């Protein structure tokens, strides 16, 4: 439970699920993020987010999913920027810990988009040099700047507001008309 999220929906919530769906520019089909919504209050007030959620106990194939997440963020930012103020990667297991500080850099986004699994569907070519020439350097940086790495643990679920306190905060928000 958090009071910083104003509105939230999942890929299962119709009709809002369509707000999480985007299309590969050079491939048949679409992809979807797991969650989306808007934040409330402070500097985040009214800002949108889309999120990918991976409830893994160990690293497993998280690096593969994260690479796909970065490529999806690159595509989504071009297709509908107002839905993409923030890209949240939420997982219960860290991955590639020695490179953790470099996961959301411009270079990391670039590598993800240029990876052989993404080149064709994102940039329309399987040739690495052609794909590299088609990259938008500004968008790479904007994606990196908007990415969050959120790593949770099951124990954290005990650190959230208890239901009575959460309801009181919600009443205060409603009473004061605290908007996004």
Image (cartoon, rainbow, N blue to C red):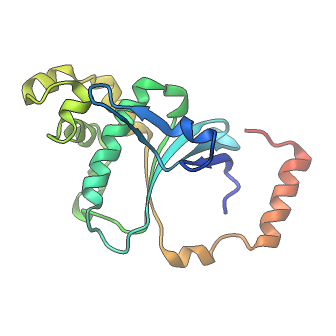
Q: In the image, is residue 118 above or below residue 55?
A: above
Q: Residue at x 83, y 50 (%)?
A: 173
Q: In the image, is residue 27 above or below residue 133?
A: below
Where the N terminus falls, by quadrant? Answer: bottom right
Measured as percent of width and height from the top left, residue 57 is found at 37, 74
Measured as percent of width and height from the top left, residue 59 is found at 29, 68
Which quadrant of the view contains residue 93? bottom left
Give the left or right position of residue 160, taking residue 70 as reference.
right
The residue nearer to you, when weighing 16 against 113, is 16
Give the left or right position of residue 148, taking residue 113 as reference.
right
Q: Residue at x 24, y 36 (%)?
A: 113
Measured as percent of width and height from the top left, residue 116 is found at 14, 40
* Furthest residue in direction right, as rendered: 175
Which quadrant of the view contains residue 142? top left
The residue nearer to you, when weighing 97 against 13, is 13
The residue nearer to you, when weighing 62 against 148, is 62
Q: Residue at x 54, y 32 (%)?
A: 83
Where the C terminus falls, by quadrant? Answer: top right
Give the left or right position of residue 129, taking residue 92 as reference.
left
């Amino acid at each position: 439970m958090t009071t910083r999220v104003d509105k939230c929906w999942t890929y299962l919530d119709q009709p809002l699920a369509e707000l999480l769906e985007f299309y590969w520019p050079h491939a048949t089909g679409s992809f979807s993020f797991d969650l989306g919504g808007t934040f409330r209050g402070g500097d985040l007030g009214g800002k949108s987010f889309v999120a990918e959620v991976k409830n893994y106990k160990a690293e497993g194939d998280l690096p593969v999913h994260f690479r796909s997440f970065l490529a999806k963020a690159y595509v989504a930012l071009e297709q509908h920027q107002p839905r993409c103020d923030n890209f949240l990667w939420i997982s219960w297991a860290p991955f590639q810990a020695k490179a953790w500080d470099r996961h959301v850099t411009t270079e990391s986004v670039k590598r993800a988009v240029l990876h052989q699994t993404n080149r064709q569907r994102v940039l329309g070519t399987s040739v690495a040099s052609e794909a590299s020439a088609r990259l938008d350097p500004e968008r790479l940086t904007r994606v990196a700047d908007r990415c969050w790495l959120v790593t949770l643990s099951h124990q954290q679920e005990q650190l959230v507001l208890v239901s009575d306190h959460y309801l009181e905060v919600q009443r205060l928000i409603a009473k004061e008309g605290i908007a996004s």
